Amino acid sequence: MKETYGRLCRGGLLLVSALPGGRPNVMTIGWGLVGRFWAGPFFIAAIRRSRFTHGLIEKSRQFTVNVPHPGMEKVVNFCGAVSGRDHDKFKETGLTAVKAKRVSVPIISECAIHYECRVIFKSEVVPSKVTKGVHNRWYRGEDYHTIYFGKIVSLYKSPRRRPLR
Amino acid sequence: MKETYGRLCRGGLLLVSALPGGRPNVMTIGWGLVGRFWAGPFFIAAIRRSRFTHGLIEKSRQFTVNVPHPGMEKVVNFCGAVSGRDHDKFKETGLTAVKAKRVSVPIISECAIHYECRVIFKSEVVPSKVTKGVHNRWYRGEDYHTIYFGKIVSLYKSPRRRPLR
């Protein structure tokens, strides 16, 4: 958890989503929470409704979160800067999508830690429920987040410990 | 975070709530998430609507989370077994409520780590948004949780490192 939180704050984590059998997409997330809910381990991710990833999670109700190694900053920045609608980010970055253990969405083999998640609950950020300060800072464009409560069905470290390139 | 998660799974954490100037209440929580949201550190707590704590947080929009030391299991169990409507749990357990740094709700001096939180957003668990499995296991009595997104405005370890008694 310490490593996950550290990476969230420094650069971000890589969230992968895909339709069953479809081309996977990867986006960078700088927000997320890890803990325990409904007596199990959970990863909470917040995705704006405009994102390509949003549509994929809505349909598949699965995602993986991958904690990058130090040295992967360039790739992490790129995955946060362009959309999967226009880019095949796996192809363009050289990241390798490999089969996950318990979900159909792949993990990223170059990363250090992998969370495999199934969406159990979701919550919508709505203007009436959020403080004025948060609204003015994050939602002036009205592109609200959906908050996905992903049950962690598998969590492991990758044996490969060297950075991408 | 590791210690917080470990205690969540083994016995639980102590959540304190209070109205301004009122008698504080403490309850045990076995669920919670820690991470980053809206560019800041957050603690998410889920409280059933029937709980005494629920009314206090609704009004004060603040809470503290206190990570107990090993050896405090008896107190932690008691605080999870009785309601603050009928019991002054601080008085009955001998726990000491001391002034927090940045919220008006107190912390518990006998604990190891203290999270001071202000509620920035809340979400209601609703039957239509949760999986059938979760609904059947946790909400047969229809006593749903409110999920409080508490911004961590202060986080520190307690200098006192010995168990309560």
Image: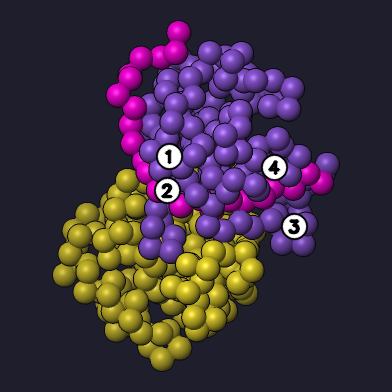
Chain colours: A yellow, B purple
Q: Chain of mark 1?
A: B
Which mark lies nearer to you, 4 or 1?
A: 4
The local crowd at label 4, few if under 14, some if 14 to 19, many if 20 or more residues have their Cα within 10 Å, is some
Q: Residue at x 54, y 52 (%)?
A: B119
Whole-percent x and y of residue B2?
37, 37
Judging by the rendered image, the residue that carries numbered circle 3 is B126
Residue A157 left/right relative to A50? left
SS for tag 4?
helix
Which quadrant of the figure has residue B137?
A: top right
Q: Chain of mark 4?
A: B
Judging by the rendered image, the residue that carries numbered circle 4 is B55
For marks 4 and 1, the one nearer the N-term is 4
Q: Say whether residue A126 is visible.
A: yes
The local crowd at label 1, few if under 14, some if 14 to 19, many if 20 or more residues have their Cα within 10 Å, is many
For marks 2 and 1, the one nearer the N-term is 1
Amino acid type, callout 3: Val
